[in-house]
Image (cartoon, helix red, strand yellow):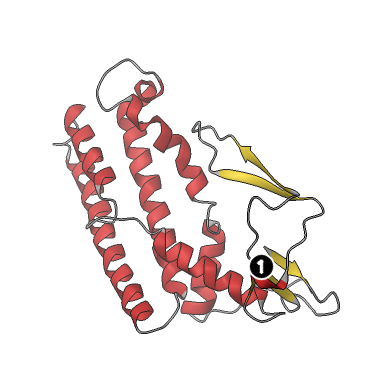
Amino acid sequence: MICRTDPDAPKHRGLTAFVVPMDTPGVEVRPLRQMSGGSSFNEVFFSGVRVSDYGRLGPAGEGWSVAITTLGFERAAASGGGGTGGGDLFDRLVLTARHVGRDQDPLVRQRLAAIYAGGKVRALTRRRVTAALKAGGVPGAEGSIGKLAWTEAMREMADLAAEWLGPRFAADSGEWGTFAWTEFLNGVPGYRVAGGTDEVQRNIIAERALGLPREPRPS
């Protein structure tokens, strides 16, 4: 939890981070059911919750740095797994193309090749992040690059599967490789929000990696 502990400090200053045990009295978690059927997002309410300084992360007033560091690690870990940056998911997409007779279509093969190549690039980016972490660093804009590239790859894979299957992915007819895509297709929009939206990632990459001018701040 990121708390404002100094109401007189401006903006991101005066924030302090705490670890709060979820069984602390007053903590209420309300799962948000998504169209995928899952509930990996939640509303969390704190009603009269009290925590001790024992749970503080970092110095008082440095909670924003804790939050940014935590998000950096989350994004670095959310950039897709496997040698192609998609692993079993990409393999299943190829098998689905064969199942529906689209694997010999040159345009389909080109799109699959682009997804595969993008996965290799993400894998190399993850290796660079891992090397920086082993050297004692923290994830920077590389985490945003990997996370954005992974959500774009998931969108492309979802679009391909939906294009091939049409309404077949929405009904459990028993046919292999059809209904099995439902949860993934319906869940992809959520991945583009989790860990920071795609728009946030683009801002981070533009400002912190490319050195472009910062967005105007209303204040």
User: In the image shown, does 46 or 146 lie closer to the viewer?
Assistant: 46
Q: Residue at x 29, y 51 (%)?
A: 86
User: Up-down: is 118 above or below 10?
Assistant: above
Q: Circle 1 sits on which residue?
A: 18
| Direction from residue 15 to residue 99 in the image, left or right | left
Q: Residue at x 23, y 56 (%)?
A: 84
User: In the image shown, does 156 or 180 lie closer to the viewer?
Assistant: 180
User: In the image shown, does 114 or 194 lie closer to the viewer?
Assistant: 194
Circle 1 packing at 10 Å, graded few (<14), some (14-19), many (20+), is some
Kindly tell me whether residue 144 is visible in this rendering. no
Q: Residue at x 53, y 53 (%)?
A: 194
Which residue reaches farthest bottom? 135
Q: State the image coordinates of residue 133 (x, y, percent, origin top left).
A: 38, 78
Kindly tell me whether residue 14 is visible in this rendering. yes
User: Up-down: is 92 above or below 87?
Assistant: above
Circle 1: residue type: Phe
Q: Quadrant of the C terminus?
A: bottom right
| Direction from residue 86 to residue 5 in the image, left or right | right
Image quadrant assignment for residue 179: top left
